[in-house]
Amino acid sequence: MNIITPTEASVMQGIREKVHAGERLSLEDGVFLYKSDDLLSIGQMANEANLRKNGKKVYFIDTMTLYFTNVCEAHCAFCSFRKDEGDEGAYTLSPQEMIEYVDKHITPTVREFHIVGGHNPHVPFQYYVDSLSALKKQYPHVTLKTYTAAEIDFFSRISGLSYREVLQELQKAGLESLTGGGAEILSDQYRKKMRVEKADVSQYLDVHRTAHELGIKTHTTMLYGAVETHEQRIQHMMSIRELQDETNGFLVFIPLSMQPHSPRAGIRRRNSAYEDLKTIAISRLMLDNFDHIKAYFINIGPQLTQVSLTMGASDVHGTLVRERISHAAGALTPEGLSREDLIWLIKGAGRIPIERDTFYNEIKVFE
């Protein structure tokens, strides 16, 4: 009996046929794509999948990042943003202090506050509620995309409330969407190795599931480039794909390229451009039930973001006023880009810039 072993070319062709037919890729397909060095074929397939969903439209939002506190009880191995209470540079802003900061930096076109921060155990849950209430009262026209699933789990622990009760309290205060952070790699083995001292895999997914049940659309991420395997990355994508099948509550998937601990770190301490583009493309191919894959220029740079628009990405995030978390970890990119820069970047890739709101409603088309 002859045993026919599939060649790399035949496996790639089989995946290509699945993509053409709109069929779902398997764990084995995703791992094969990561191990393949045929980046152009992977990118072409991702481009096809993206064009089928979004045409040539690429989305951005005028957004402002806010961080009420950098004091955090967790000591995750990859984080350079956190501080202990009393450390030099540690801070916890009152709602009024945050309003004063926003008043100095906000522009008339900002549509969204992106709010994340440390898990500060020295203030009560009510502090986090009051912080949102104050912002919503002062800036009622700005959408509050606030807190990660890990923060919601932390609030549940310090308040004694369930995830549902925490989210309902925050909704009353003005929360309209959850950020995607806290996912890192959805593998308990990885989280133990990287000392991820916050919500575990099931808790992360349960928070998002609960939010979706309450009608809250959310974002989700994957922080790649540390100690995880390619299989763990694909399993991560499949976990959120499965939840999306169940709830259809995710708006976008955001692959986040791990940053080194120092801006002076050399290129060998960073993910390669090849790895970043491959991850964006594979994300587009694996997550067939997601409308959008985001290229996060803060982590991969504006020029690579532009290239990614022909390899599966349909979103370039937004203007960001003074991003801090990735920059604390050694990002070399700008802390933000202007609307004009984002429009130029998208048009330069032969795409159509679309200004959006948090929920991907189109605000303005820049033909």
Image (cartoon, rainbow, N blue to C red):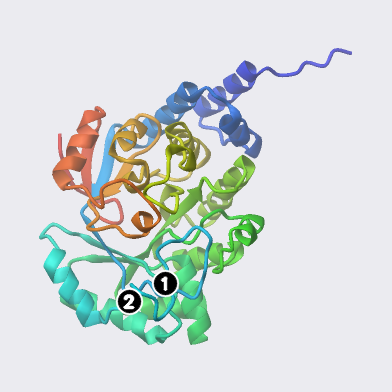
| Residue at image point 58% right, 55% down | 186
Q: Are marks 2 and 1 in contact (CB under 8 Å)?
A: yes
Q: Which residue is mark 2?
A: 91
Closer to the camera, 14 or 199? Answer: 199
Where's residue 120, x and y in %?
43, 78
Q: Which residue is mark 1?
A: 83
Q: Mark yes or no: residue 139 visible.
A: no
Q: State whether residue 203 is above or below residue 169.
A: above
| Residue at image point 31% right, 69% down | 67
Where's residue 111, x and y in %?
20, 59
Amino acid at the residue labelled 1: Lys
Amino acid at the residue labelled 2: Tyr
Q: Is residue 352 left or right of residue 268?
A: left
Q: Mark yes or no: residue 285 visible.
A: yes
Where's residue 149, x and y in %?
47, 66
Q: State whether residue 364 is above or below residue 203.
A: above
Quarter occupied by the N terminus? top right
